[in-house]
Image (cartoon, rainbow, N blue to C red):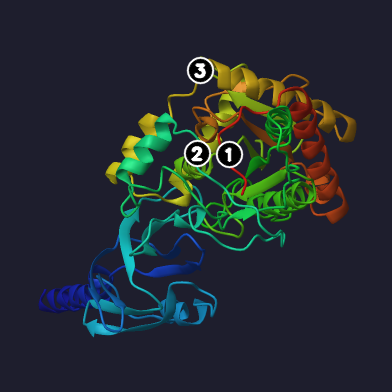
Amino acid sequence: MRADRRRFLHSSSVALVLSAPVLARGATIVAVRVWPAPDYTRVTLESDQPLSATQFMVPDPPRLVVDVKGLQLSPRLKDIVGKIRADDPYIAGVRVGQNSPDVVRLVFDLKQPVRPQVFTLKPVAPYQDRMVFDLYPAHADALAGLMQGAPSRAGGGGTNVAAAQPDRLGDWLRAHGDTIDSAQGARMTQAPSDFATRPETPAPAASAPSAQRSVRRDRRIERSVLLALDPGHGGEDPGATGPSGVHEKDMVLLIAHHLRDLAMNTPNMRVMMTRETDFFVPLWTRVEKAQRANADLFTSIHADGWFTPEARGASVFCLSQGGASSVEARVMAQRENAADAVGGIDIHAHDYQVAKVMLDMSTTAQIDASLKMAGQTLRQLGDLTHLHSRQVQQAGFVVLKSPSVPSMLVETAFISNPEEEARLQTPAYRKKVARAIFEGIREYLATRPPLARRRTMV
């Protein structure tokens, strides 16, 4: 009996010793990612358990100090040091160490003061628990690049832009911007830095009143058209993934660059892009950028995936104020609208909640113009590739909810289809897709030039 008791106590002690590290183990970092971008830099810590952290700023020199609780320093976490790029606009470097037995401290050495936004995300799609650090510029709005003067990417000389008539969403954005100057809405005097421009055809000088009327008429006809291009997904949100591992976010960015180049080489047409590189942009921010820039047209570019590899073909979508035009359109909209959950936003932010409400103010006139632009684009795509649907589809896409800008979403292909994925990886084919979209937009503009927005050319 005593021997049995000793064996039982010994086995129990062994079990407690073996289980103790498991019970005491904190979270484990499974991935570290850094996404630098002009708008902001995002740092993501992905872990197998939820993390919590506290942070504070040190002003001189500017540093962000973050203490992550329940964490042990690991080689995976140390990888963050090598992920900071030299061209990161906000982070100069990062140091990481074990500050206390269960707290890891990260010190971000900054190139400029920042306004950090730290939040956590629950597991979704391919991701486990995530802690996100978004570093925004401290003394400027996150979208200030659209409002500040900068040389044109196209190298065009003296094209400047004045503000358009205010719109409802734009009014709200200007009223709630952190550091937007109150006089800014009256008139912008320099070209936005996110614009790619070409010089607009100058109007001839005239002294007679009749000649002046002619000049004004010509300028109205040939005024610069601003096209907003929106490459879908980006950064933390890869979008759909093809059989060989190709991400939607990468293919649509390349197509958008080709489309941008076509527009840049067209007189009286300019371009702004919601993202130029690989970083995440929330859906409402994409619309916000177009609204602030007073864009005339908005085109979102995608390459969707489906549940089976047989689905194929291009499609064009517009917004619907009612129900979706088909089951597939509804599913597509649901998947695209889930981008914010995958890419990661702080849903507790007040501005985000208000912006979501403001995005529901799209008008019947906007949808009617959008359908005409989408119809022209669909016909051009039909000359190039198989169409998944020969009719423009409609559903409640958040990214198309601009109150005053004709907007369409182009699904260039099904990246889940092996053949279409292979074509998308071909530069020549991507250029053909961009050309088809561009020709559709040009045909639309030839019959329905956008209304003047008082964008004075000086």
Depth check: 65 or 131 in front?
65
The residue lying at 45 percent from left, 40 percent from top is 284
In the image, residue 412 sits, relative to residue 7, either above or below, namely above
The residue mark sitting in front, 3 or 2, is 2
Question: Residue furthest toward the left?
Answer: 2
Residue under numbered circle 3: 321
Q: Secondary structure at mark 3?
A: loop
Depth check: 208 or 339 in front?
208
The residue mark sitting in front, 1 or 3, is 1
Residue under numbered circle 1: 295
**Amino acid type shown at disc 3:** Gln
| Label 2 Cα crowd, 10 Å radius (few <14 / some 14-19 / many 20+) | many
- Say whether marks 3 and 2 touch (CB < 8 Å): no
Q: Secondary structure at mark 2?
A: helix
Identify the disc placed on residue 291. Answer: 2
Number of numbered discs visible in the structure rendering: 3
In the image, residue 16 sits, relative to residue 442, either above or below, namely below
Q: Secondary structure at mark 1?
A: loop
The residue lying at 68 percent from left, 29 percent from top is 209
Q: What percent of the width, then of the height, locates residue 322?
A: 51, 14
Q: Earlier in the sequence, mark 1 or mark 3?
A: 1
- Say whether marks 1 and 2 touch (CB < 8 Å): yes
Would residue 416 be found to the left or right of residue 49 on screen? Answer: right
**Amino acid type shown at disc 1:** Ala
Depth check: 98 or 161 in front?
161
Q: What percent of the width, then of the height, locates residue 266?
A: 79, 46
Q: Earlier in the sequence, mark 3 or mark 2?
A: 2
Would residue 3 be found to the left or right of residue 438 on screen? Answer: left
Within the image, what quadrant is residue 90 found in?
bottom left
